[in-house]
Image: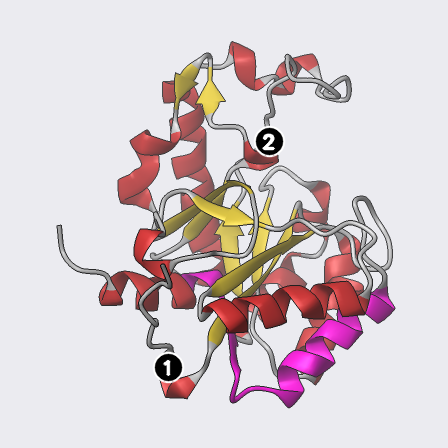
Amino acid sequence: MAAKPFNWPNGAKAAVSLAYDDTLASQLDVALVQLNQHQLKASFYLQLSSPLLTARLSEWRAAAAQGHELGNHTLFHQCSASKPGRDWVAAENNLDTISAVQLVQQIRLANSMLFAIDGKTERTFTAPCGDELAGGQPYLPLIYDDFVAIKAKTGPVVANMAQLNAYAVEVIAPVGSSGAELIALVKQAAQYGTMVNFTFHGIGGDHLSVSAGAHAQLLAYLAANRDIYWTDTFLNIMQYVKAQQPAD
């Protein structure tokens, strides 16, 4: 059964969230430059302990002043070391050995630090590695009141806006994707009348990267089709989505 059409602002057919995790140099050097060239707004999820945050603080602050979102990606980017392929997780950053209460305290401190950078009080969160347990306990429900929305796991283009849980939004994390592949996902969201949530890491460098050319191709397409796609920060999009959802 077809989902009920969702009314996006200004008659748009879909929303596009462009987000960038982990506080990487290529995001400032490449992604931000391209975004500003095309006058598109995006979300940058900062690991607050990253040396690059301190070293280039004025640039992150300038990004916020330009209308981009600075999101919370925790202080230390802890992930579960017990999952397959997690040999890279350092013992001190093992999410299996920190309590949910401790992690929540750190996340709230990260919010305070972000407030000191951009002066904003409303924010969104992306769970590092998509992990939802700290010390074996679900921690995301403990921070629902601290955030407008939460990105919790990887998944496809949103299929039905009526069923979207603002605190368990799925994201697509492209690695090595071509511009055409990225644009195809955007077109799929327009076909559904929903939204696509991209979570990039490196752009033309760093880790889990997408080439600068592929990224530029996606942005050029979005900029040329503003009447079809509402591209904005995850915060702005989710504030709008929540306002459209029926009250419980």
Residue at image position (67%, 83%) is 38
Q: Toward the viewer: 76 or 129?
A: 129
Q: Image quarter for residue 84?
A: top right
Q: Is residue 186 above or below residue 39?
A: above
Is residue 246 found left or right of 62 in the rendered image?
left
Whether residue 140 can be seen here: yes
Neighbours of disc 2 within 10 Å: few (<14), some (14-19), many (20+): many
Q: Is residue 83 above or below residue 208?
A: above
Is residue 163 found left or right of 200 in the rendered image?
left
Residue at image position (46%, 19%) is 134
SS for tag 1? helix
Residue at image position (78%, 74%) is 216
Q: Is residue 228 magenta?
A: yes
Residue 17 locus on image (x, y percent): 54, 64
Label 1 belongs to which residue? 9
Residue 108 locus on image (x, y percent): 39, 37
Cβ atoms under marks 2 and 1 closer than 8 Å: no
Amino acid carrying label 2: it is: Phe
Q: Toward the viewer: 81 or 97?
A: 81
Amino acid carrying label 1: it is: Pro
SS for tag 2? loop
Which label is found at residue 76?
2
Q: Which residues are magenta?
A: 212-235
